[in-house]
Image (cartoon, coloured by chain):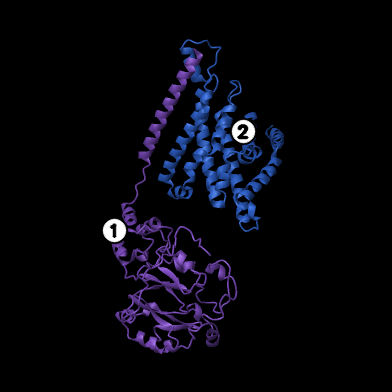
Chain colours: A blue, B purple
Amino acid sequence: METLSQLIIIFIGAALINNYVLHYFVGICPFLGVSRRVETAVGMGFAVTFVITVAALLNWTLTFFILRPSAPLTQWVWRAAGGSPSHSVDLSVLSYIVFIFVIASSVQFVELYVRKFFPPLYRSFGVYLPLITTNCAILFASLEILKHMQDPLKVWGIGEALMLAVGAGLGFTLAIALMAGIREELDLCDVPAPLKGAGVALIVAGIMAMAFMGFAGVDKGVETALASFLR
Amino acid sequence: MLTGLIVGLSAVLLAALAVGMGHVLGWANRRFEVSVDPKVEAAVAALPGANCGGCGFVGCREYAEAVAKGEAKVGLCGPGGQDLARQLADILGVEIEETFPYRAVVHCSAEREQRLRRAPYEGEPTCAAANLVAGVQGCTYGCLGFGDCERACPYDAVRVVNGLSRVDYAKCVGCGACARACPRNIITMVPFKAERMLVVACSNQDSAGDVRAVCMLGCLGCRACTRVAPDLISMEGGLPSINYENYDPTDELLEKVLEKCPRKRMVFVGRPTEKDLAAVAGEELPESIQADFKTTVDDTEWRG
């Protein structure tokens, strides 16, 4: 039960409290670039959710077995080479290059797959699908997973990684869809000339970020509620 | 030794990732290959590629896809015309209906000084802007002459001369860009069943007195033409309207309609006849033709 409540808290934390766009300010380029129409914004959001999940799962696997300090594979090679077990091999210097490599490849794969089996979706994504490759939210999710795997005694399992990725993706979808809804209304508003376009969009994003600060501390409440509920 | 191992492992890991991912993507590329219908490719090659949107689709490729699926008719491409329709029909193996090329017709014939009650207008020199202002000219239906249509035309076929928009039928391909650009909707697309077509060269719906007050040429709505050719011409509001479905270019009735019209607002447009050419044969052309620096890149204008 302890783990279940931890999973839920990781999910809520990634989706609302530490919303990637509005708290960490990652993934801003699609957040501003593709948030003109709600329809495309939601499409982009789900595409990012999908890619973030796939990439996080692949990267978790690589991190767990190879990249983290004293990972089983590297440790085995180290011992096979005759090193002393008290030393730990740490390949996490490679994390950036490996993560970007995996993200780029999985986006390519997803693009091929979608083009073959979901042509209407492919057409509505257009150029955005390959652009997800450079979406920093995805790299950030992988790096956050890596951060929680540094301590060999408290390593995240695949469930935690999955929850973080799905939560982050849905949080991104929520933020971009809300933004698109506001911007659709903004088109009809009398915006002062110097602020038209990007200016007012950034102001709106800032106000939204402040609104999302209201979620801070929700995790504590959820934790106590879950504890009494699951007991 | 630890450092050496880390360097070695890094190299091995990256090489393995590169080879592995390369194989996976290569396999996926072949496994998920999308075969494009060769008919679509052939149709795209046959289409003009102007992406003018005259067919009602976003571009030539979208139209080709719709045609290949049987969702659109083959004869919709204005620039391609009848030849292209036949070509597309060959490619796709479908029957073609007889279609006629659509050409733009300006339903106004008053030049600047023939339009009365004009007031000086010094705003933005576009029809769209001038149309928002009351009192630029008396006639609220007729051509404003600021050339939105001229700028919209991708084929250089529309020119504003002396305040009136005119179509060069040697260049017009019927994409309809001018008709969409005109804020007063006085340009329509007419199916040209022959090289010369009879059209109503006025858009004013008002009664005779009001028309006389604002225009020296406008149609008075006298119905003379509808009496001569009741099957062909009917009144719609204050204006006669020609039903081009019943239009027969060889009909002698057309000349008669022309004769009966008291204001001569029924006119032929299109290729001039031998007689018309002979009538202007004596006129001298200017020795040099000035370049007017029209650019299709933007619609900025030099205003001295």
Q: Quadrant of the N terminus of chain A?
A: top right
What amino acid type should be assigned to the residue bearing mark 1? Ile
Chain of the residue under the numbered disc 1 shown in the image: B
Q: Residue at x 38, y 88 (%)?
A: B259
Q: Which residue is mark 1?
A: B91
Mark 2 → mark 1, Cα distance in angstroms: 59 Å
| Quarter occupied by residue B139 | bottom right
Front residue of A141/B117: it is B117
Q: Quadrant of the C terminus of chain A?
A: top right
Q: Residue at x 44, y 44 (%)?
A: A114
- Asked if residue B136 lies left or right of residue B228, the reply is right
- Asked if residue A163 lies left or right of residue A229, the reply is left
Q: Residues within 10 Å of mark 2 (few under 14, many from 20)?
A: some
Residue B79 against residue A138 in the figure, above or below = below
Chain of the residue under the numbered disc 2 shown in the image: A
Residue B117 against residue A185 in the figure, above or below = below
Instruction: Select label 2 or label 1 by which is in front.
Output: 1
| Quarter occupied by residue B24 | top left
Q: Dot 1: what SS? A: helix
Q: Dot 2: what SS? A: helix
Same chain letter for marks 2 and 1? no
- Which x, y percent locates residue B156? 40, 65
The circle on residue A25 is none
What amino acid type should be assigned to the residue bearing mark 2? Leu
- Which x, y percent locates residue A9? 65, 34
Front residue of A164/A193: it is A193
Front residue of A230/B2: it is B2
Front residue of B205/A86: it is B205
Q: Which residue is mark 2?
A: A7
